[in-house]
Amino acid sequence: MATDSKTTAQGAPKNPSDRSRKHLIAFAVMMVLTAIAFAAVATGALPVAALVTLLLIMAAIQVVIQFFTFMHLDQKGHFFPIFFTGAGLLFAVVVVLGVWLLL
Amino acid sequence: MSSHNDLSMAPKMPDHLETSTLEGKNKILGVWFFIGAETVLFASLFGTYLALKNQHMDGPSSQELFNIWMVAVMTVALLTSSLTSVLGIVSMHRNNLQRTLFWFGVTVLLGATFLGLEIYEFYEYTHLGHHFTGSAFASAFYTLVGTHGSHVLFGILWITSLIIQVRKQGLTPVTAPKLYVSSLYWHFIDVIWVFIFTVVYLLGKVG
């Protein structure tokens, strides 16, 4: 490790083990949400309208977790990425609804 | 311990190697642009699929066709690969070359597992009479899921080539943004899959 001295000069990097733990927790939550979604469909216990709502909410939560933990949008200085991705998502909703309802 | 170093280093030492150069910062911003554009690409394919999913003609319908347990295994593989690629980035921030290479290697293997299962799935579906040109449902399905699959394939090739380069050159201000950006791309592919397994497979099973 030639860069050891450099690493220590930088000072303790802001709790990297905390960051790992955050990612592991996010991953666990995503797995649980996925399991609930698959189980809900496999058992067929819910009426269709409630099931569809549940599935879409599960997906939306997972995507928010993915963006804000794994893709680091929770860190400082991410105004433009959030802005552009938000714009992309906005267009996506318009496009999906537009194509779906028009065809 | 670090406080007395603050004054001695006029330009802040990079906590994150990938944003230590302007080029690195621009690359990351560029990939976010790209992700915004890809979102719209996939949105068009999702819209088309939703509009056409009931036009299955003589072929099997989505309820008859989809094998939910195989999709569950594929989902676990891809979600786990998303975790391993972010662990690769955490290792990169700790300047641990070996562990970075290890986690990105695991990411590639899980991606390949996913892709293998998807190829097998498509192969099985064509045997059940679900052909690309068979119906509007089939065309829309293969176009949407296949476009995602081709993104996974591209990600596998990209990350593999980065592993080779980083093994040779180490973690530098040049290679770090590349790894970071490929990991962003990989997470985005995972986000798309979350929508595919929800909208195509699970809702397709519901009807």
Image (tube, helix red, strand yellow):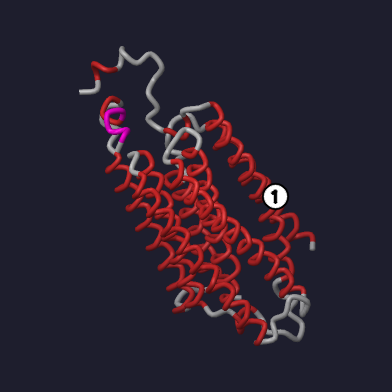
**Picture layout, residue B205 above or below residue A6:** below
- Toward the left, the furthest residue is B1
Q: Is residue A83 left or right of residue B86?
A: right
Give residue B103's quadrant in the image. bottom left
Residue identified by numbered label 1 = A94
Instruction: Give yes or no for residue B184 being in the magenta stretch.
Output: no
Quadrant of the frame with the C terminus of chain B: bottom right
Magenta stretch: helix, strand or loop mostly:
helix
Residue flagged by tag 1: what amino acid is it?
Val
Residue A81 rendering spot, x and y as whole percentages: 56, 36
The crowding category of the residue bearing disc 1, from other C-alpha atoms within 10 Å (few below 14, some 14 to 19, many at least 20), is some
**Picture layout, residue A35 above or below residue A65:** below
Q: How many marks?
A: 1
Residue A22 rendering spot, x and y as whole percentages: 33, 47
Which residue is rendered at x = 52% and y = 57% of the image?
Answer: B190
Q: Nearer the viewer, residue B134 or B94?
A: B94
Q: Nearer the viewer, residue B91 or B137?
A: B91
Which residue is rendered at x = 46% and y = 28% of the image?
Answer: B20
State which chain disc 1 sits on: A
Q: Is residue B113 left or right of residue B201?
A: left
- Toward the front, the furthest residue is B168
Which residue is rendered at x = 51% and y = 77% of the image?
Answer: B68
Residue A55 rendering spot, x and y as whole percentages: 51, 64
Q: Which residues are magenta?
A: A2-6
Give residue B196's quadrant in the image. bottom right
Residue A83 rendering spot, x and y as whole percentages: 58, 35
Quadrant of the frame with the N terminus of chain B: top left
Q: Secondary structure at mark 1?
A: helix
Q: Nearer the viewer, residue B15 or B139?
A: B15
Which residue is rendered at x = 60% and y = 68% of the image?
Answer: B200
Instruction: Give yes or no for residue A4 being in the magenta stretch.
Output: yes
**Picture layout, residue B50 above or below residue B188:** below
